[in-house]
Image (spheres, helix red, strand yellow):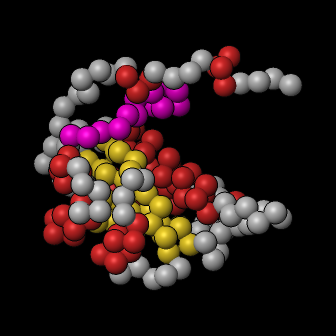
Amino acid sequence: MTFLELAKKRYSVRSYSDRPVEEEKLNYLLECGRIAPSAANYQPWKIFVVRDAGLRIKLASTYNREWFKQAPVVLVFCGDHSIGWKRSDGKDHTDIDVSIIIDHVTLAAAEQDMGTCWICNFDAVACSEILDLPSSLEPIAYLSLGYPANEPDDPASHLKRRSLDDIVKEI
């Protein structure tokens, strides 16, 4: 499979089967994330793997969508702004670095025929309390993870994108 084929295969899954995620596959995904690049190689991230059903239900209270409760695994990606690289004008690249690791994991999951959904619309303060995170860690995004329960209604909807002419400007 080419990279383009893999990228086109990935979509946001919002319906999960009850099939558990195998330990070796989860470790593979995490390793794919671990090798992600970061600004100045500071790697300002921490990933919390949440499998426990009770804890997943608590996290679901921070993002109130019924489908979210179906995912057998929730990955909570956090950034540590105290170690993230800052550009000379003060621009903090922690969120960017965390986004890169998440993207590596989402693509690796698609390669393994698993589905993910990148979630940013959650109560980060409540998440921090539920996971008892130190103040140095900010929850940046959730990634639901598991095997899709079914095929998407419109398998091409995630491929509806602006044209290259619309997004690329050669100068």
User: In screen coordinates, is 157 left or right of 41?
Assistant: left
Q: In this view of the protein, which residue sits in the foreground, 15 or 22?
A: 15
What x and y, as percent, mark residue 72? 21, 55
**Which quarter of the image is occupied by the C terminus?**
top right
Residue drawn at (37%, 22%) of the image: 157
Tell me where residue 110 sits by quadrant.
top left
Residue drawn at (43%, 57%) of the image: 141
What x and y, as percent, mark residue 43? 61, 66
Q: Is residue 131 above or below residue 142?
A: below
User: In screen coordinates, is 164 left or right of 2?
Assistant: right
User: In screen coordinates, is 63 left or right of 82?
Assistant: left
**What is the magenta range?**
2-15
Tell me where residue 8 sits by quadrant.
top left
Residue 24, can we see it?
no
Residue 60, can we see it?
yes
* Direction right: furthest residue: 171
Count of labels shown?
0
Residue drawn at (26%, 40%) of the image: 14
What x and y, as percent, mark residue 107? 45, 41
Q: In this view of the protein, which residue sits in the foreground, 1 or 168?
A: 168
| Residue 151 falls inside the magenta stretch | no
Residue drawn at (76%, 66%) of the image: 90
Q: In this view of the protein, which residue sits in the foreground, 139 or 32?
A: 139
What x and y, as percent, mark residue 64? 24, 54
User: In screen coordinates, is 52 left or right of 166?
Assistant: left
| Residue 7 falls inside the magenta stretch | yes
